[in-house]
Image (tube, rainbow, N blue to C red):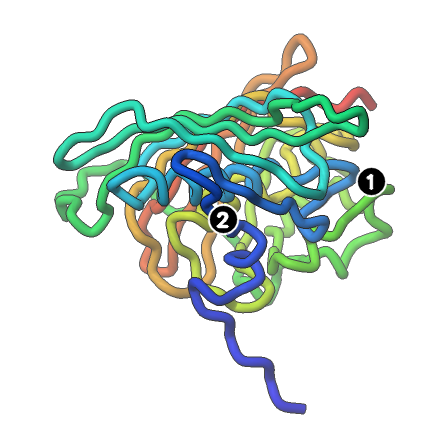
Amino acid sequence: MAQAAQALIGDSEFDRDTAVTLREEGVYDAELSAGWTIIHAVNGGYLLAMLGRALGEALPHSDPFSVSAHYLTASVPGPAVIRTQVVRTGRTLSTGQASLFQYTEDGTEVERIRVLGTYGDLDSLSGDIRTSVKPPAMAPIEQCFGPGDGPAPIPGSSAITERLDIKLDPSTVGWAIGAPSGKGEMRGWFGLADGRDADPYSLLLTVDALPPTSFELGLKGWTPTIELTTHIRCRPAPGPLRVSITTRNLAGGFLEEDADVWDSADRLVAQSRQLARAPRS
């Protein structure tokens, strides 16, 4: 059987499902795909990528540098409207905000997510790097585990797993066999299932695509994001990404997740921190 051709940036399922259509200045129509749902909600990283794309079209600079999102209500598959506003434009950076709205059954408009982002040109950044961080220590990809290697999934939609190519490091999958480590860590190799290479917009998805660290703390169930801030540090090289996520503190029913994303050239390409509500189980 002939192997399917690798999808290209700009011509993949991810690009089609995060596309926005300009209706009028500052207003975009969108369709939230059911293919990016997990348990019973649309994935937060997918939503961030869609709003990130809308801001990239609305602002004079197209590359996200820093994007902060507040998740106000759970999004559902179906039509949506994104409204953008240019806050400031400069020579090297521009800032804008965007909100995604959906309509309830009675016709009420509900805001789902609000984003504030600063954009620029990643190709213009200095090559000077002074860092103490290193790529995460992980098993080779062929020794890691994907969704098909574990037990039955958590009840609910797992559609997003069919669109992702995730291989988790063996040291962070104890939860899948009923033996969580008790450490708030999750590490894995990441790519899109159709082979599309990463770009700044897909990195907005990547930071929120692995299973939550709460699984390794012995908790299962939906871990809804309250706020997520992502920094894109450089344009990623082709090839699989390595993602490391850690939680140091779960208290009062909330936890933080800090994510680092590394490309195939051993460069730190994205970082994020999110506040999430811990599962109640």
Amino acid type for the residue under numbered disc 2: Thr
Please count the marks in the image.
2
Amino acid type for the residue under numbered disc 1: Gly
Q: Is residue 164 visible?
A: yes
Task: Indicate left or right for 88 with 40 as reference.
Answer: left
- Looking at the rendered structure, the secondary structure element under dot 2 is strand
Q: In this orientation, which residue lies closer to the viewer: 74 or 66?
A: 74
Q: Disc 2 versus disc 1: distance between alpha carbons?
A: 45 Å
Q: Quadrant of the C terminus?
A: top right
Label 1 belongs to which residue?
178
In the picture, residue 225 is in which quadrant?
top right
How far across and how far down the image is residue 143, in percent?
A: 61, 63
For the point 75% across and 27% down, the residue is: 104
User: Which residue is the extreme one toward the front?
Assistant: 24
Query: Does residue 11 sit above or below 270 in this rendering?
Result: below
Say if mark 2 contacts mark 1, CB within 8 Å.
no
For the point 45% across and 69% down, the residue is: 8
How far across and how far down the image is residue 38, in percent?
A: 73, 42
For the point 71% across and 42% down, the residue is: 77
Circle number at residue 21: 2
Tell which circle, 2 or 1, labels the residue nearer the N-terminal end.
2
Packing grade of label 1 (10 A; few <14, some 14-19, many >=20) is few
Task: Indicate left or right for 150 with 130 as reference.
Answer: right
Packing grade of label 2 (10 A; few <14, some 14-19, many >=20) is some
Q: In this orientation, which residue lies closer to the viewer: 79 or 8?
A: 79
In the picture, residue 220 is in which quadrant?
top right
